[in-house]
Image: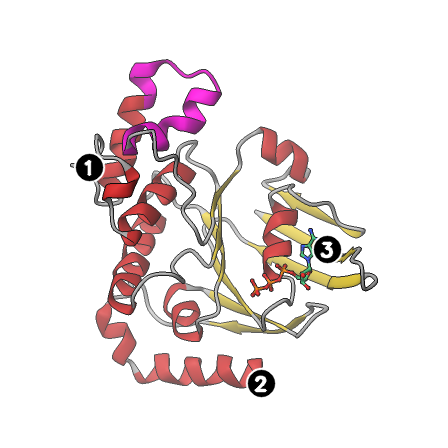
Amino acid sequence: MITIHQVSKTFPSPQGPVAALEAVSLRVAAGEFVAVIGPSGCGKSTLLRLIADLEQPDVGSLVVGGKTPREARLAHECGIVFQAPVLYPWRTVRQNVALPLEITGQPRAIRHSRADDLLRRVGLGDMANAYPQHLSGGMQQRVALARALAFAPRILLMDEPFAALDELTRERMQQELLAVCADPNLAPSVVFVTHSIAEAVFLADRVVVFSPRPGRVERVIEIDLPRPRTPETRNDPRYFALVTAVRAGLR
Ligand SMILES: Nc1ncnc2c1ncn2[C@@H]1O[C@H](COP(=O)(O)OP(=O)(O)OP(=O)(O)O)[C@@H](O)[C@H]1O
């Protein structure tokens, strides 16, 4: 679903060029969940921005859903969820989720029924008429997830989406995200950036460990934990072994 081949990216800065990524290659299969972890500033967000066509590589190439990143963006192949949910406070929850459909001119009845369906999937079926400021942080992030799914994208790009949440809410959100991924009507490929080793291991099929800047793929760790992942998964000795392996990779 995603092929990244020998991609490098350098940004100008007043202190001179900053090499964010260096010769990064990575493939993500259809329906695969890949977590990306690495030290602060190693280019993880830049990688997502390149896939989403929000930045262009200096060298190397990307194929996203069989298309160039630009074509993929125009075809709405990627849904994006950022750390802060960036919801519009003057729009109801339903109107926030329906916004991408509104921008692309979908009729009101279709966008409302689609938004309500997505809100049910993320456990917010009864909050459609609420305003974002009346929701908890976890609920707001669920709205952002529902909005990212508005076009049923084949790819979901998530940049530390649960970092601002308390630990228990975060674990619940991880479980809900996995339920969305297991839904055969959605089943996106996911690239999930996180700083949490435990989160990466719990969610992913593979964890990609980046080196300090300039980010390079340091190690790829297969997460061979059975699915569905449940709260019991976190007590599995294999889970602990994989957490230890990712931690060792980061060091
Ligand atoms: N638009 C930009 N202009 C200049 N420098 C940039 C730009 N975007 C990113 N950088 C620099 O590139 C490097 C990588 O940034 P990026 O945000 O991708 O890292 P990250 O791994 O996501 O960091 P963190 O884990 O702290 O969120 C950083 O040094 C950052 O300052």
- Which residues are drawn in magenta? 93-111
Residue 50 against residue 233 in the figure, above or below: above
Please give the label number shown on residue 1: none
Residue 217 lies in quadrant: bottom right
> Would residue 88 appear left or right of 77 to someone viewing this image?
left
In the rendered image, the vertical position of residue 71 relative to residue 124, given as above or below:
above
Callout in the foreground (2, 3): 2
Q: Position of residue 72 (x, y in %)?
A: 60, 35
User: Please, what is the dominant secondary structure of the magenta stretch?
Assistant: helix
1 and 3 marks in contact (CB < 8 Å)? no
Residue in front for this viewpoint, 210 or 31: 210
Q: Residues within 10 Å of mark 2 (few under 14, many from 20)?
A: few
Q: Position of residue 221 (x, y in %)?
A: 52, 74
Provide residue 237's location: percent of width, then percent of height: 32, 85
Q: Secondary structure at mark 1?
A: loop
Residue placed under numbered mark 1 in the picture: 127
Residue type, label 2: Arg
Amino acid of disc 1? Met
Q: Residue at x 45, y 64 (%)?
A: 205
**Which residue has dot 3 on it?**
5
Marks 2/3: CA–CA distance:
25 Å
The residue pinned by badge 2 equals 251
Q: Secondary structure at mark 2?
A: loop
**How far apart are the alpha carbons under marks 2 and 1?**
43 Å
Q: Answer left or right for 10 relative to 197.
A: right
